Amino acid sequence: MNMLTVSGSPHVHGDDSVKKIMYGVVYAMIPAILVSVYFFGLDALKILVISSVACIFFEWIVQKYILKGPNTINDGSALVAGILLAFNVPANLPVWMIIVGAFVTIVVAKMSFGGLGKNPFNPALVGRIFLLISFPVQMTSWPLPKPVFGGTALMDAVTGPTPLGLMKEQLKMGQSIPDIMQMPEMPGYINELMGNQGGSLGEISAIALILGALYMLIRKIITWHTPVAYLLTFFAFTGIMHLIDPMQYASPFFHLVTGGLMLGVFFMATDMVTTPIAFRGMLIFGIGAGLLTAIIRLWGAYPEGVAFAILIMNGFTPLINRAFKPRRFGEKVAQA
Amino acid sequence: MSTLKTFSIGGVHPAENKISAGRAIEVLEPPKQAFIPLNQNLGAPAKPLVNKGDEVKVGQLIANGEAFISSNVHSSVSGKVLKIDTITDTSGYKRPAVFITVEGDEWDPSIDRTETIIKDIKLSQKEIIDRIKEMGIVGLGGATFPSHVKLMVPDGKKAEYLLINGVECEPYLTSDHQLMLSKGEEILIGTKILMKGLGVQKAFIGIENNKPDAIRHLSGLAESFEGITIVPLKVKYPQGGEKQLIKAVINREVPSGKLPIEVGAVVHNVGTAFAVYEAIQKNKPLIERVVTLTGKPVSRPSNFMVRIGTPISQLFEKAGGLPENAGKIISGGPMMGKALISLETPVVKGTSGILVMEEKDSARVEIKPCIRCGRCVSVCPMGLEPLLLSQLSKREMWDKAENERIMDCIECGSCHYICPSGRPLLDYIRLGKNKVGQIIRNRGKK
């Protein structure tokens, strides 16, 4: 008896792993992937594949030749970043641009901080914002959906604005919300829910994103705290503004199903690395992101504010972690 | 049906693996040689009363627990004292122990060895406390705190409830479960004795819902015991933690750094209640206990009644031998137990089980970078931030670690269990607790 293992307790381990969590996120994105391929066809597939392969490749090369760390491309995190980046761009983005975006996402936003777990900002969002401010034209002219299997395309035009962008433009031109909503270019709620609207790959279908989110909630990959706080705050704020002036501010329901809100709420604001660790902090993060998103959407220069709002809140995460600790046992003595 | 009670913050649910659950308690014969450690309690070691060559009987006092927090030690066998020497205990340290060469099985005549159950409690409150001290009773849940000390309520505090811990939330272990099934009435009488010793009218026995037979059995018996209520609890680890049990049963939170008496509660294990029954009603000191021998590779998982001081190797002889693919042997459960370095380690008062793990399950999972998922925070039953505490320990930032309440950690291991990156969070936190504890004690001296 001389080969017994001796180590500290606990001696058993749960069956969760980083890899399982990351691939769980990948599975959760499958509905949105299918919808994007349905509406944008091979263009969407091309962007998804190139973005993912480029992200994985960049991570491999940095680990091997610069950080000289263990090979991490199997943990799934680079694949998640790759798909998310693709979700954040229009399907007709030139190939070289998505590769540049992947470079910024992985090399600048993730690996330069030391890799998985150490990056302060959501890598895919950094990639998205970099592309948006570097190539504003290509990043904001969206192909309109053209379902591959029959179905009716919304319009004949090849590209056009998203519903949110259209609303912003028309408001600037002095139109009122009820008039804008009547315009033939507006897809209507059902189309917006299903994904038959202009937008980035992964943003268009609220239903597909919610399906993925449910999967992640059931598998306990994410918790409800951030998404619920985010959505409630955002809904309340846009709702109040809509009640105050329905001519200038669209209905909160319109805001919920357009732009990158659902994608941001369920897949970006729940990123473990860049958001708070305790439930209280998650609630604060969600409230902050909801408020910022609403403010940028209603008064900002860009039609949608999800990406900016989440990145700004990422910056606050360390402070939130310090200020909003979990409730300690014995902190508030509950009496029977 | 109302939802089952449980504690409110954190907790995990590891696979239960109670493979020895159906095995009735078997009495293990005394060993050929017993090693009886002198320090079988939390606190100061007892002073030996015997010398090399002395003849001892079963139940004879062999070491005196003189300090306030200390406990008497009795011989569990009869025979001749071979020597007083050191032996490696379950924590891996060498401790003084009395080595006894066993000859026959002669018991002290004052011990009542019949099966007759004596219900009537004749002793007064003070006599109960004194007898419990005399008989060397310590907490059998594993912490081995001297039981009589818990019954002495400090001035200004008042005990309202006695809580009996029959939770057995550690996976694999079934010793308390079997004890509740076979010695239910004795446990209830023991509970009554403890209530009298403590001066309370109300006692609760908390049992996790994965032991429905024990809940049924004790609930039936409890009908004829006034003031004792059986409380079925939701299965969640670490519900057997003293603070978690109090929260689950009477919904009170023991403040940081304070004892349960602060909220009017005193907690004893079911095994302790049984030992108290035997000490008071049968005049029998704490010389044996139930030990679960289990693990997936064990051919005959069992629950044994074992004399204290029996080498663990002896248990394996009875349970079909030491499995060839044993990779790790643990004293206690898989969540909080200690890995043993030798099979010659003796069973002590705090030994609730011996668990064998296969070689393939013995190694720890590979350590990956922390992804800040916060799972360790969400499962911590004390509301702490294990990832932060382990970082502070690693960086030797003791002041900050103290402020983040590192001393509140109950070392349940839920954080390491849940960590998807396999980070040994508790290893670092333990290190930090050790250091911060030293700093706090030194501060007290000045």
Image (cartoon, coloured by chain):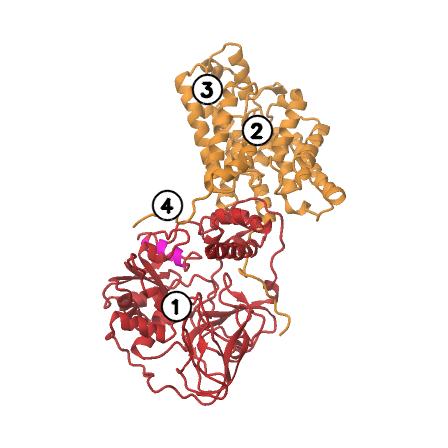
| Rendered shade, chain A | orange
Rounded to the nearest angstrom, the CA distance separating label 2 from label 3 is: 20 Å
Identify the residue under disc 2: A307
Q: Chain of mark 1?
A: B
Q: Which residue is more in the foreground, A175 or B32? A: B32
Task: Tell me: B395 left or right of A50.
Answer: left
Q: Give yes or no for contact between labels 3 and 1 (Cβ–Cβ under 8 Å).
A: no
| Chain in red on the image | B
Between the C-alphas of marks 4 and 3, the distance is 43 Å
**Quarter residue B263 falls in:** bottom left
Q: Crowdedness of circle 4 by 10 Å Cα count: few (<14), some, many (20+)?
A: few
State the CA–CA distance, disc 3 to disc 1.
74 Å
Mark closer to the chain start, 4 or 3: 3
Mark whose residue sits in front, 4 or 3: 4
Amino acid marked by disc 2: Ala
Disc 1: which residue: B68
**Secondary structure type for disc 2:** helix
